[in-house]
Amino acid sequence: MAKFNPIRAAVLYAAMAPLLASCASSDMGAPRTEALTPKQAKTLEKQLAGKIPGEPVRCLSSSGTYDTIRVSDDILIYRQSGRLVYRNDLKSSCPGLGRDSDIMVIRQFGSSTCSGDFFHLVDRSSGIRGPTCVLGDFVPYRKPAGDKG
């Protein structure tokens, strides 16, 4: 077994730092929409149309009733009503989520679904477990008061 060499480790780290930095997005806090297909963009626009974003919340109560709408491999919409939806930009991409053909199995702790909770996809026909994915913060989008739509 090779011994730890601090000089070799420092050189390796120095060589890897630019590569690792290039993987990080410059706007990691901003919602991702640039990679949406026209159909996905239309779905997202339909769900958010006429609504104003609020401050992100960490958790949604499990006592609420939500329709989960898969926009893409990165974005979920939790629809509580026509007036209120929550946009969730996942912590990282979840391959296959946007196809909407697999079953989402959420691993929930306590009485809320929260940022950082895991879920995985299960193939509907074979039962084979797919990728594990992580929820992000929930951004509420509400219709303004007095808006009849």
Image (cartoon, helix red, strand yellow):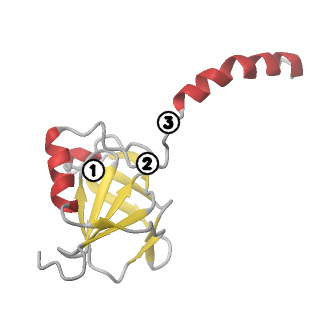
Do the CB atoms of the residues marked 3 and 1 lie less than 8 Å apart? no
> 149 or 90, which lies in front?
149
Circle 3: is it few (<14), some (14-19), or many (20+) Cα within 10 Å? few
Tell me: 34 left or right of 2: left
Q: Read off the residue under disc 2.
A: 30
Q: CA distance from mark 3 to mark 1?
A: 34 Å
Q: CA distance from mark 2 to mark 3?
A: 10 Å
Tell me: 80 left or right of 109: left
Q: Read off the residue under disc 1.
A: 127
Circle 1: is it few (<14), some (14-19), or many (20+) Cα within 10 Å? few
Estimate the x, y position of residue 74 in percent, counting from the top left. Answer: 34, 46
Q: Nearer the viewer, mark 3 or mark 1?
A: 3
Q: Nearer the viewer, mark 2 or mark 1?
A: 2
First in sequence: mark 2 vs mark 3 = 3
Q: Secondary structure at mark 1?
A: loop
Amino acid marked by disc 1? Gly
Amino acid marked by disc 3? Ser
Amino acid marked by disc 2? Ala
Q: CA distance from mark 2 to mark 1?
A: 35 Å
Q: Read off the residue under disc 3.
A: 25
Residue 5 in sight from this viewpoint: no
Q: Secondary structure at mark 3?
A: loop
